[in-house]
């Protein structure tokens, strides 16, 4: 896994989306991380008091993996820039087909009669 700067991560993320535009997928993970607690054996360890959390961001298409570390104070701005990259490259999505509502013989939508019956029953009480 390659640890990149924020700007290079966004460029590489755009390249991942371009490679997988027709077929394929891109997965993105965002995880809170303390840099002082970095070993597998020490999963339960408590981070140092002066250690500020960072956001570890990973992206992969199944073959290529990229990642970056963003400081806690810059996460909101970076997320905005990353969402702009994602919007730019997600134009190949397929639209889902809409289901047509069934109409009864009289031209009314089904389900409307049930609502009228409930209203009459509530008014009678």
Image (tube, grey):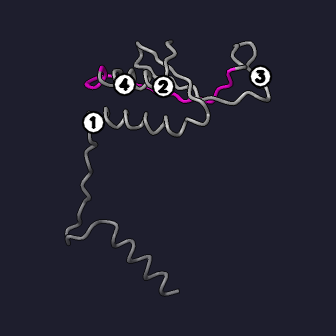
Image coordinates for residue 27, horizontal then vertical, percent: 44, 26
Q: CA distance from mark 4 to mark 2?
A: 21 Å
Who's the residue at 53% across and 26% down the image?
57
User: Toward the viewer: 50 or 14?
Assistant: 50
Image quadrant assignment for residue 32? top right
Query: In the rendered structure, which disc, 4 or 2, sits on the residue that comes first in sequence?
Result: 2
Q: CA distance from mark 3 to mark 4?
A: 33 Å
Nearer mark to the viewer, of 4 and 2: 2
Q: Secondary structure at mark 2?
A: helix
Q: Is residue 110 above or below residue 97?
A: below
User: Is residue 21 located in the magenta-colored stretch of the structure?
Assistant: yes
Q: Return the residue found at the far bottom.
A: 124
Q: Which mark is residue 25?
A: 4
Labels 4 and 1 touching (C-beta < 8 A): no
Query: In the rendered structure, which disc, 4 or 1, sits on the residue that comes first in sequence?
Result: 4
Image coordinates for residue 104, horizontal then vertical, percent: 23, 66
User: Is residue 23 located in the magenta-colored stretch of the structure?
Assistant: yes
Query: In the rendered structure, which disc, 3 or 4, sits on the residue that comes first in sequence?
Result: 4
Nearer mark to the viewer, of 1 and 2: 2
Nearer mark to the viewer, of 4 and 1: 1
Q: Which mark is residue 44?
A: 3
Q: Which mark is residue 6?
A: 2
Q: Which residue is mark 1?
A: 91
């Amino acid at each position: 896994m390659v640890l990149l700067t924020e700007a290079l991560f966004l460029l590489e993320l755009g390249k991942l989306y371009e490679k997988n535009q027709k077929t394929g997928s891109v997965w993105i993970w965002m995880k809170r991380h303390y840099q002082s607690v970095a070993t597998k054996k020490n999963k339960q360890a408590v981070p140092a008091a002066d250690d500020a959390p960072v956001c570890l961001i990973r992206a992969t298409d199944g073959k290529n993996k990229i990642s970056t570390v963003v400081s806690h104070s810059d996460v909101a701005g970076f997320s905005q820039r990353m969402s702009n990259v994602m919007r730019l490259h997600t134009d190949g999505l397929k639209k889902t087909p809409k289901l047509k509502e069934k109409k009864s013989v009289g031209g009314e939508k089904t389900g409307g009669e049930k609502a009228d019956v409930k209203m009459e029953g509530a008014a009678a009480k």
